[in-house]
Amino acid sequence: MRILIGDDHLLFREGLRRLLEQLSADAKFTDASTFDEVLHLVQNPDEVFDLILIDLQMPGWPGFSGLEQVCTTASDTPVIVVSASESQSDVRNSLDAGAAGFIPKSSSVKIMLSAINLVFSGGIYLPPSAIHADVAAKATPISHHDHDHGGDRMASGHQLTQRQWEVLNCLREGKSNKQIAYELGLSEGTVKIHVTAIFKSLGVKNRTQAVIVASELQR
């Protein structure tokens, strides 16, 4: 396993390496202390990573467009932001740029390892504070009438068919369109149609936002 750690603090990089050795004893690490170094490494076809961990506001940081460039260039590699920031806007902008997770540096060792394992399994990790804040902003109250109608009307204003709830549950598990199509016996084209309809119904723009809202609606 090859892991790229982008952070301008040497002490933190060393601590992260020791932590990640618990995931894979034979892991090989590459360090970068500036954003330009990170970008250079991911653009090098001879450098292939299994995981990229990157801090925000590194020297040379161009903003979230830079993170999006890293995620796009290393499209087959999960990118996780590990940051001292716990700003909701930083979490949202990171995920919108293509990051597979956002881990605050204040997290415990157990949480960090669990978050990385979740991302490796195809999921998306958000800190609990971000989930609660996003749900409060997006979710609408669930009425008694909606409970009576089960899965097809989980919340006022959100009407999904039973099949769409099945697709949404697959999204919550981090499954790709291809995996969802295979599991539900649908074509990938049909899955894409369902996903688009789900986004429209929930009033969201991407899978991450859909998963956040769905998690709250199904409590």
Image (cartoon, rainbow, N blue to C red):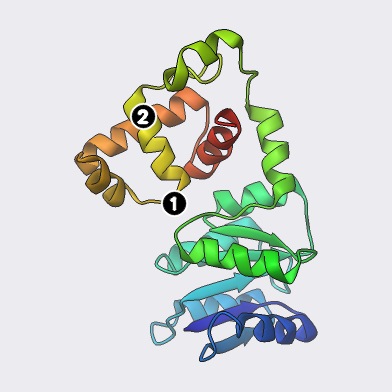
Q: Amino acid at mark 1?
A: Gly
Residue 121 position within the rendered picture, expressed as x and y whole percent measured from the top left: 45, 62
What count of labels does the image hold? 2
Please tell me whether mark 2 sits on a helix, a strand or a loop: helix
Q: CA distance from mark 1 to mark 2?
A: 15 Å
Q: Residue furthest top?
A: 145
Please tell me whether mark 1 sits on a helix, a strand or a loop: loop
Q: Amino acid at mark 2?
A: Gln
Q: Residue at x 58, y 62 (%)?
A: 67
Using the rendered view, name the quadrant where residue 32 is placed: bottom right
Q: Residue at x 42, y 19 (%)?
A: 152
- In the picture of the structure, the residue carrying the numbered disc 2 is 164
Is mark 1 in CB contact (under 8 Å) with mark 2? no
Residue 191 is left or right of residue 200, and the answer is left
- In the picture of the structure, the residue carrying the numbered disc 1 is 174
Q: Residue at x 62, y 79 (%)?
A: 5
Does 171 sit above or below residue 103? Answer: above
Does 30 sit above or below residue 194? Answer: below
Badge 2 crowding class, 10 Å Cα cut-off, few under 14, some 14 to 19, many 20 or more, is: some
Q: Quadrant of the C terminus?
A: top right
